Image (cartoon, coloured by chain):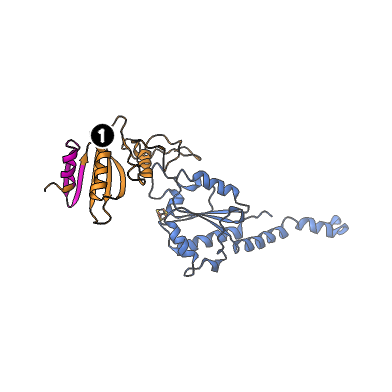
């Protein structure tokens, strides 16, 4: 108590720093980041049609702040892995993931990307999470646009509540 | 069923070329001796106007002997006539003459048949895999290739 009286300002800033202020900043950063998602669509198969349907005006993914598709991983925040990933393309996906600038998230779109889908054979990767980390899985073959938007909302939830580097 | 004109014409110039034939449901098919395949197809193209090679593929009839079949589908673009030609190949070192000189489109189709079934096309100057990667071992559409045997380039093995 006597110490507090001696230097109240110093002690207060010490007790607050790294706790109250930081936590709020994380929230603000999460809020900003979740509504300005630049996407890298890694589209390889039929699920791509549903991705396009979701992105275009009828379902309008722009309403959720995730309209901007960038075809350079350097400018993207979210990699949408849309469709079947074969063993031949797998190293390319890994490279794209490594090239994407932080902070980054990965959405596994549809049954194929999530677990190989109908293709249990020589050619198909049995889930992209054997190669790169995945944040959100969207079920379906292909998923309806509503399911895709639900996946996006789940990703936004995750971004809002996670710890952020800056 | 009566023999169709293409069959009769081939028999005239190459008496031993046609091994078998059928005409089920309008699918006219000739089964041809592999050694004479280029002659037969040249005749079909030049005399009967089969100017389009729609598809060239292979089938594995394991454990039947002969094990493999190479299948050619031809279309006459003007008269819309279609013809299927099959060649049967033995299991050990299956190979057949390339028809790139007749139909340039056969290039990739023959490479695909090599990739998937391991059938060599003699005279093809670029006989390497079309779809799979070079380090892949075996030919996955052969019936004795294990269905789920994977050969990943990265990530966990199988
Ligand atoms: S999950 Fe279904 S729709 Fe999507 S890429 Fe695979 S097979 Fe196509």
Is residue B24 covered in magenta? yes
Tell me, by letter, which chain the rendering colours orange: B
The residue at 33%/45% (across/down) is: B103
Residue B42 to residue A61: above or below: above
Closer to the camera in the image, A128 or B48: B48
The residue segment tinted magenta is B6-30
**How far from the left and from the top, in percent, is residue B17?**
20, 37
**What count of labels does the image hold?**
1
- Looking at the image, residue A151 sits to the left or right of residue B62; the answer is right
**How far from the left and from the top, in percent, is residue A150?**
49, 62
Tell me, by letter, which chain the rendering colours blue: A
The residue at 61%/56% (across/down) is: A75
Report if residue A155 is visible in the image: yes
Closer to the camera in the image, A103 or B100: B100
Q: Which residue is mark 1?
A: B35
Residue projecting furthest to the right:
A6
Is residue A113 covered in magenta? no
């Amino acid at each position: 108590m006597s110490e507090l009286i001696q230097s109240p300002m110093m002690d207060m800033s010490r007790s607050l720093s790294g706790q109250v202020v930081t936590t709020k900043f994380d929230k603000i950063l999460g809020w900003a980041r979740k509504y300005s998602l630049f996407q890298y669509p890694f589209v390889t198969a039929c699920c791509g049609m549903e991705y396009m349907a979701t992105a275009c005006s009828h379902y309008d993914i722009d309403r959720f702040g995730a309209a901007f598709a960038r075809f350079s991983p350097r400018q993207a925040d979210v990699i949408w892995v849309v469709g079947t990933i074969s063993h031949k393309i797998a190293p390319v996906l890994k490279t794209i993931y490594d090239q994407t600038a932080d902070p980054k998230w990965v959405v596994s779109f549809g049954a194929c990307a999530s677990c190989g889908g109908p293709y249990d054979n020589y050619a198909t990767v049995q889930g992209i999470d054997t190669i790169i980390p995945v944040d959100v899985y969207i079920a379906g073959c292909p998923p309806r646009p509503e399911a895709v938007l639900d996946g996006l909302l789940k990703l936004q939830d995750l971004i809002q509540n996670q710890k952020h580097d800056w | 069923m009566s023999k169709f004109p293409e069959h009769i014409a081939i028999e005239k110039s190459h008496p031993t070329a046609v091994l078998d034939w059928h005409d089920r449901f309008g699918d006219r098919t000739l089964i041809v001796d592999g050694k004479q395949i280029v002659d037969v197809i040249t005749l079909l193209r030049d005399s009967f106007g089969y100017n389009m090679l729609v598809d060239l593929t292979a089938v594995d009839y394991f454990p039947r002997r002969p094990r493999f079949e190479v299948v050619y589908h031809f279309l006459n673009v003007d008269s819309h006539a279609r013809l299927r030609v099959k060649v049967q190949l033995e299991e050990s070192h299956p190979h057949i003459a390339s028809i790139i000189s007749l139909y340039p489109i056969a290039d990739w189709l023959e490479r695909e048949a090599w990739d998937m079934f391991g059938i060599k096309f003699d005279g093809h100057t670029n006989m390497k895999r079309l779809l799979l990667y070079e380090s892949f071992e075996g030919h996955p559409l052969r019936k004795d290739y294990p269905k789920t045997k994977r050969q990943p380039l990265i990530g966990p093995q199988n």
